[in-house]
Image (cartoon, grey):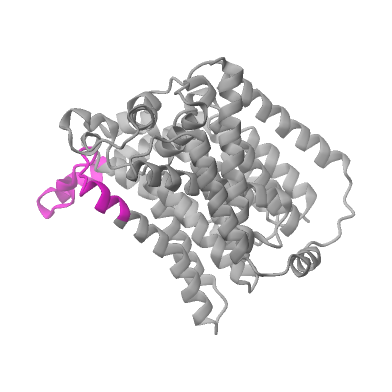
């Protein structure tokens, strides 16, 4: 199969996932902009398509494009049949939620042009060669390729000590998505499958743009979209094949759903919280932490006197995480990690923790001083010249997430500095598009 044909098959798989995701997420996304709905459709569809792959594997049926298409079609038809709400009423209410804009079109157009150019460069770089990131070769792509080639999820992936390098404790959405997309072409093609990552990046930019244009202004939307697209530490070929780029999409969707919940009284926002929660948890382990922190924020800032609605939102956030963890536990058993030395948390070793934590903070400060000083100063100035925005309640989530990363590096089984240098920049950058969304929601005098 030629590269062009392989790319077309992956594109067909992404289109199928988006179509079924669109049908299933309709009840949760009415009133949103078209750009947001496209992003939610892809996120929702990837989970559905991965579940379809699991169904085929459980039935001992070799996954193929037409079988996954049939599954997607059946789920979409069922979702549309169950959706009895009236589209006209939705459209009318959606129109009411979007204030008319009289902003100049020139600056936003230029900024969107910058974002489009940056994304196009990433698209070209991602497709220029087969995926080669260490994390792709060691676990994300390794698991996906094993599943695609064997048409099963071998127990040895979770039980064979020799395969411990594959991080058997990690969530499985990325490997399952890559295996499902490979099924559409009938073979594993590293270069064509890289299209998955520009698609997730585009969905992220669409979600940022659509949300801020709906909630704030066209200028804020264009600014945040350009800043997110220019995040070179995230959108680069080295991250094609990992979970960071789709995880950035998950965080953006989670933040937008949380802000909507705090600002409006609609069932659809709680549904979006549930979809975002599942997407976060199924991509990376720290996704569960981010969801938990969002739940704390909602519990603190939710409108008083509406305990029932708050309980519903907290359930929508936390239950998918718990259900996902239970499903993984039942499927592969308890998976311990050798990355962390939890004996450091025992009383007899508490004396070692301050020095290790200080070492971690020192490296964080050095990274910030040498690599991120200009952005940090720019953010500080931005806070000084802007007023409180609709997303400010979420701001503490980001430093707390970084703090937990620092604690994790402190109890690393290996050299904490080695762990920081190998992972911190990459995992921290996954939060940048979501942070940009929250930051650009502030009011500019």
User: Which of the two residues, 171 or 213, is positioned nearer the viewer here?
Assistant: 171
Residue sticking out furthest to the left: 348
The magenta stretch spans residue 395: no
> Residue 125: horizontal and vertical position, in percent?
59, 20
> Residue 287: horizontal and vertical position, in percent?
42, 50
User: Which of the two residues, 119 or 110, is positioned nearer the viewer here?
Assistant: 119
User: Which of the two residues, 162 or 435, is positioned nearer the viewer here?
Assistant: 162
The magenta stretch spans residue 343: yes
Which residue is painted at 54% across and 55% down in the image? 254
Which residue is painted at 18% across and 51% down in the image? 345
> Residue 108: horizontal and vertical position, in percent?
81, 42
Which residue is painted at 88% across and 43% down in the image? 105
Using the image, determine if residue 303 lies above or below residue 106. Answer: below
The image quadrant that residue 95 belongs to is bottom right
Which residue is painted at 53% across and 44% down in the image? 70
Give the total number of marks visible in the rendering. 0
Q: Which residues are magenta?
A: 327-356
Q: Is residue 442 left or right of residue 351?
A: right
Q: Is residue 162 left or right of residue 242?
A: left
The image quadrant that residue 236 belongs to is top right
Is the C terminus in the top left, top right, bottom left or bottom right quadrant? Answer: bottom right
Q: Is residue 361 left or right of residue 442?
A: left
Q: Is residue 425 visible?
A: no
Q: Is residue 223 visible?
A: yes
User: Which of the two residues, 91 or 372, is positioned nearer the viewer here?
Assistant: 91
> Residue 84: horizontal and vertical position, in percent?
65, 69
Magenta stretch, overall SS = helix
């Amino acid at each position: 199969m030629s590269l062009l044909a392989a790319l077309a098959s992956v594109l067909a798989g992404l289109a199928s996932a988006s179509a079924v995701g669109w049908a299933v997420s309709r009840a949760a996304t009415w009133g949103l902009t078209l750009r947001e709905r496209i992003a939610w459709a892809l996120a929702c569809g990837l989970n559905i398509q991965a579940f379809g792959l699991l169904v085929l594997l459980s039935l001992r049926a070799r996954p193929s494009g037409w079988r996954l298409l049939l599954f997607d079609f059946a789920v979409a038809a069922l979702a549309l049949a169950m959706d009895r709400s009236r589209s006209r009423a939705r459209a009318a209410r959606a129109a009411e939620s979007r204030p008319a804009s009289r902003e100049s079109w020139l600056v936003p157009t230029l900024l969107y042009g910058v974002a489009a150019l940056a994304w196009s460069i990433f698209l070209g770089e991602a497709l220029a060669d087969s995926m080669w990131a260490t994390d792709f070769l060691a676990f994300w792509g390794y698991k996906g390729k094993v599943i695609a080639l064997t048409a099963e999820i071998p127990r040895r992936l979770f039980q064979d000590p020799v395969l411990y390098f594959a991080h058997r404790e990690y969530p499985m959405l990325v490997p399952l998505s890559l295996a499902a997309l490979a099924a559409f072409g009938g073979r594993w093609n590293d270069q064509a499958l890289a299209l998955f990552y520009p698609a997730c990046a585009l969905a992220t930019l669409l979600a940022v743009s659509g949300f801020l244009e709906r909630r704030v202004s066209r200028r804020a939307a264009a600014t945040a979209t350009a800043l997110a697209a220019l995040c070179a530490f995230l959108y680069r070929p080295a991250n094609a094949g990992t979970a960071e780029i789709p995880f950035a999409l998950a965080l953006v969707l989670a933040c937008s759903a949380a802000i909507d919940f705090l600002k409006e009284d609609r069932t659809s926002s709680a549904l979006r919280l549930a979809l975002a929660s599942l997407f976060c948890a199924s991509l990376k382990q720290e996704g569960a932490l981010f969801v938990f922190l969002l739940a704390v924020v909602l519990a603190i800032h939710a409108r008083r006197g509406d305990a029932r609605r708050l309980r519903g939102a907290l359930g929508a956030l936390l239950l998918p995480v718990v259900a996902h963890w239970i499903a993984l536990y039942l499927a592969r058993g308890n998976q311990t990690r050798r990355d962390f030395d939890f004996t450091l948390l025992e009383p007899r070793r508490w004396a070692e923790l301050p020095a290790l934590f200080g070492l971690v903070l020192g490296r964080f400060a050095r990274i910030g001083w040498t690599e991120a000083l200009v952005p940090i100063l720019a953010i500080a100035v931005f806070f000084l010249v802007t007023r409180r925005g609709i997303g400010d309640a979420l701001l503490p989530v980001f430093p707390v997430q970084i703090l937990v990363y620092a604690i994790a590096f402190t109890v690393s089984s290996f050299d904490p500095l080695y762990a920081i240098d190998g992972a911190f920049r990459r995992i921290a950058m996954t939060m940048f598009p979501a942070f940009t969304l929250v930051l650009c929601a502030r009011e500019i005098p």
